[in-house]
Image (tube, rainbow, N blue to C red):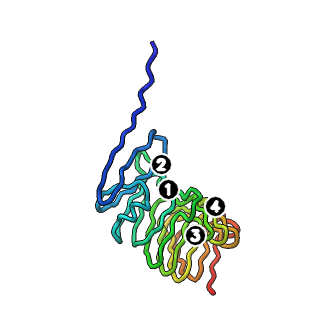
């Protein structure tokens, strides 16, 4: 007896809360998808950029799955990766478009338990930390990013603070000139147990004019 093939079905669950956008589940369980949830309002978004635009300063955003694209952080936030059933590991992938994360001047950002990859920029392929900002990475992996000039993984510049905590790892990043892992320009670098290794042409370059 011939068994008919199952009919393909697509379901769209729309949740418009606090400026959120509709979330469309992936066509199959094996396809990476991105979901960002505001921990206070429970609003759901399909990109980190849209979620941060809608959030109030000081908010916590939960990130699930593989989120593709770049994000500019303009307000104080906490971004925490959550590995939930049905989602791939929490990841921000810049898709070779620019710095995966750009942090505005004066902003404080904490990033927890996710991977940052696929960045490609002149400076700061993975993360670009601007003047007077503060970035704390807790159990974060920054890898597979490139910069044509400096800071393949991270470019930290101008009186800012960069803190690497827990099992944070900066590895497998490249730059065209200096600071394949991290290029620190007149900033403050802290690290409790963070690891910086196997970056090219070097792991860490720290200078101040």
Q: Is residue 18 left or right of residue 129?
A: left
Q: Callout 4: helix, strand or loop?
A: loop
Question: What percent of the width, then of the height, locates residue 100?
Answer: 53, 63
Question: Which residue was labeled with disc 2?
Answer: 88
Question: What percent of the width, then of the height, locates residue 83?
Answer: 43, 52
Instruction: Relative to 191, say whether 50 is above or below.
Output: above
Q: Callout 1: helix, strand or loop?
A: strand
Question: Which residue was labeled with disc 1?
Answer: 91
Question: Which residue was labeled with disc 3?
Answer: 154
Q: How many marks?
A: 4
Q: Callout 2: helix, strand or loop?
A: loop
Badge number at residue 37: none
Residue contact between numbered discs 3 and 4, judged by CB atoms under 8 Å: no
Residue contact between numbered discs 2 and 3, judged by CB atoms under 8 Å: no
Question: What percent of the width, then of the height, locates residue 121?
Answer: 61, 66
For the view shown, which residue lies furthest in the top direction? 1
Q: Tag 3: Cα neighbours inside 10 Å, few (<14), some, or many (≥20)?
A: many
Question: What percent of the width, then of the height, locates residue 74?
Answer: 43, 71
Q: Nearer the viewer, residue 192 or 89?
A: 89
Badge number at residue 172: 4
Q: Tag 4: Cα neighbours inside 10 Å, few (<14), some, or many (≥20)?
A: many
Disc 2 to disc 1, how far (Cα)? 8 Å
- Give the residue drawn at x 58%, y 67%: 195
- Give the residue drawn at x 43%, y 74%: 108
Instruction: Relative to 191, say whether 86 is above or below.
Output: above
Disc 2 to disc 3, how far (Cα)? 24 Å
Disc 3 to disc 1, how far (Cα)? 16 Å
Q: Nearer the viewer, residue 178 or 82?
A: 178
- Residue 109 lies in what quarter of the image? bottom left
Q: Nearer the viewer, residue 7 or 146?
A: 7
Q: Earlier in the sequence, mark 3 or mark 4?
A: 3
Residue contact between numbered discs 2 and 1, judged by CB atoms under 8 Å: yes
């Amino acid at each position: 007896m011939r068994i008919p093939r199952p009919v393909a079905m697509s379901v769209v669950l729309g949740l418009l809360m606090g400026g959120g956008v509709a979330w469309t589940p992936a066509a199959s369980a094996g396809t990476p998808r991105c979901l960002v949830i505001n921990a206070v309002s429970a609003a759901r978004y399909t990109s980190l950029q849209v979620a941060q635009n809608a959030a109030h300063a000081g908010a916590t955003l939960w990130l699930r799955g593989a989120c593709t694209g770049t994000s500019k952080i303009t307000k104080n936030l906490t971004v925490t990766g959550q590995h939930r059933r049905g989602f791939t590991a929490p990841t921000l992938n810049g898709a070779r478009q620019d710095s995966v994360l750009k942090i505005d001047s004066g902003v404080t950002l904490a990033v927890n338990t996710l991977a940052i990859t696929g960045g490609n920029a002149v400076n700061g392929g993975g993360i670009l930390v601007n003047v007077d900002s503060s970035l704390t990475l807790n159990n974060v992996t920054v890898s597979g990013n490139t910069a044509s000039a400096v800071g393949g993984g991270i470019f930290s510049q101008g009186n800012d603070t960069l803190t690497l905590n827990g099992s944070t790892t900066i590895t497998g990043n490249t730059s065209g000139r200096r600071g394949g892992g991290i290029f620190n320009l007149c900033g403050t670098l802290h690290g409790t147990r963070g690891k910086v290794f196997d970056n090219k042409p070097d792991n860490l370059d720290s200078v101040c004019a």
